[in-house]
Image (cartoon, helix red, strand yellow):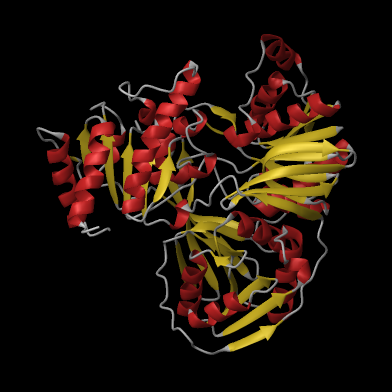
Amino acid sequence: MKTFVYIDHFKGDVQPASWEALGLAKSFGTAVALVFGAGVDAVAKAAVEYGADEVLVADDSSLTDYRAETYASTLSALASSLNPNLILFPTTARTREMAAMAAVDLNTGVLTDVSALEANGDSFVATRPIYEGKVLEKTVCSGKPVMATIRGRAFPKPNREEGKSGTITKVVAAGEAKSTVEGYSASESAVNLGDASIIVSGGRGVSNNPSLTPPAGMDEKGAEVWRAQQGFALVTDLAQLLGGAVGASRAAVDGGYITYAHQVGQTGKVVAPDLYIACGISGAIQHLVGMRNAKVIVAINKDADAPIFKQARYGVVGDLFQILPALTEAMKKKLGK
Amino acid sequence: MKIIACIKQVPDSEAKVRAEGGQVSWGDAPLVINPFDEYAVEGALQQKEAAGGTVTALCVGPESAKEALKHALAMGADEAVLVSDAALNDLDTVGAAKVLAAAIQKIGGADMVVFGRQTLDNGAGLTPAQTARVLGWPMLGLAGQIKVEGGSVNVERVLEEGRQSMKANLPAVLSVVQSIGEPRYPSFMGIRKASKATIPIWSLSDLGATAPAPIVTRTELMNPPVQEKEVEMVSGETPAEIAEKLADKIIAEKVL
């Protein structure tokens, strides 16, 4: 059994679920890691250290910026000549596109957001969420190779063996770019909710601190956003202390309190951290489907009837502006930080 | 500019969806336009307003999906086309892309095809890029802003790593995210117009196509495991006391 594992990275920063995919591939047999880009030696070396049996590197100036078309063509060409049984990817915006296109080239299919994958003779059975995770399906792909993007944190991450040596082979890039990348804006910081093991999230409630007086001259909306930003500062304090990421409900994003990249839920990111602390989030179904697979859910809300408490392991009915700073303090003390 | 917005009909997001007897059931919840596709229609209408032209809403689905197309018409789309054929019941995403591409060609092509970023039902988010691949057009995914200049289009993609500016020649396929702007509500005039509109239904033979054989198929449906733990409410006299107790409980879970 030969599996290709596409190592997804952004300017050399590897999506951790790539290594989880590599571990999964090893459980089926031979794992061949694919690294595309320009100047990606460090990524190829890391793939060896995480256990790849072989690494194929397409290092080419045409691959400097990710473009779905060239990445898909390079992948399709390799799959056509080397005939893997399976191609695994971490689930990211990039892999969804390039896998989608390569599936058209290779006349096969892609199973996305896979949380379990079993070998079944020559084929594979994948478990994946549909209807926003309200239902799960088992699904098979009759095409060859089978392609699957795996959900982050669903499979164990293999150990890294620093300094391990292995076979790294150069391969050629294929395809023609159909677009140009003009640049990236640094205005939004990177938010990687999918890989976070701890998430502290804020909702509409974070704007609800009447004891704060906004700076003079602000209109009503401006004052609301200002209040919310003070609230999110408390959320961020706890998240940083615990080494976690900051999430948000759709209400908070729509209110302009925080950027869309932080949104958890149906129209945002579906997450499954070990710990999810929901602050001032009432728990609309659209939010719940995005976080209910968290191992431990803590809800802090003023309203004792808020639906979020039905999903929570621990609940506090109270004012988040008092509870959150107190919780951050208590954690600091207990964790010795 | 000729713009096509691709939409799908799905059960309302409030629906209690469950696996029942090997089928997906959503009770008596209504079928609506896929919420992500409302953003696609909104994005298409914005471009029409900026550059002139027409917006055609395109859907592959059962005859009931006419209602989703009427919603797009009521929002302001000029025309709507439904591709419906009993042979398309088991369509997978590659198949959907092939049928959509054939329909786009029959419409007479377009300068821009706009998708929502994924559907609420299957949720794979593959069809936009696959349609682009079948057509051989550039794919600009997850656009939060669209700007057309001359024969090219510039988008701001909303990615996990931040915003990326990307440019391609038209015709192109785009998928849009929420940052495009809240979908407009259908106007009274729009609803009247939509209720009177005739929506052509194209079969596979109208497209000169045969049903693509499904490659991805479902073998089993399951309801997610029900959460067993009851919520434990943590209370106390002061915030500090509550925080103290809560911190101990979180630490005892060994998730830090």
Q: Is residue B228 visible?
A: no
As rendered, which of A53 and A39 lies closer to the eye? A39
Give how far across and how far down residue A12 sits, in percent: 60, 68
**Quarter-of-image position of residue A167:** bottom right
Residue at the spot x=18%, y=42% of the render?
Answer: B243
The number of callouts visible is: 0
Which residue shows up at 45% across the image and 42% down it? A264
Q: Which residue is most to the front?
A: A216
* Residue A100: quarter of image: bottom right
The residue sitting at the left extreme is: B237
List x then y, in percent, for residue A257: 47, 32
Q: Is residue A279 visible?
A: yes
The quarter of the rendered structure image containing the C terminus of chain A is bottom left
Q: Position of residue B177 (x, y in %)?
A: 62, 39
Q: Is residue A177 above or below residue A86?
A: above
Of the pair B139 and A237, the residue shown nearer to us? A237
Position above or below: B179 against B21:
above
**Which of B21 and B200 lies nearest the eye of the viewer?**
B200
Give me the residue at 40% from left, 78% from top: A159
At x 35%, y 33%, the residue is A281
On screen, residue A161 versus residue B202, left or right, reads left
x and y percentages locating residue B151 in the rendered image: 90, 41
The answer to whether B158 is drawn above or below residue A39 in the figure is above
> In the image, is A174 to the left or to the right of B226?
right
Is the N terminus of chain A in the top left, top right, bottom left or bottom right quadrant? bottom right
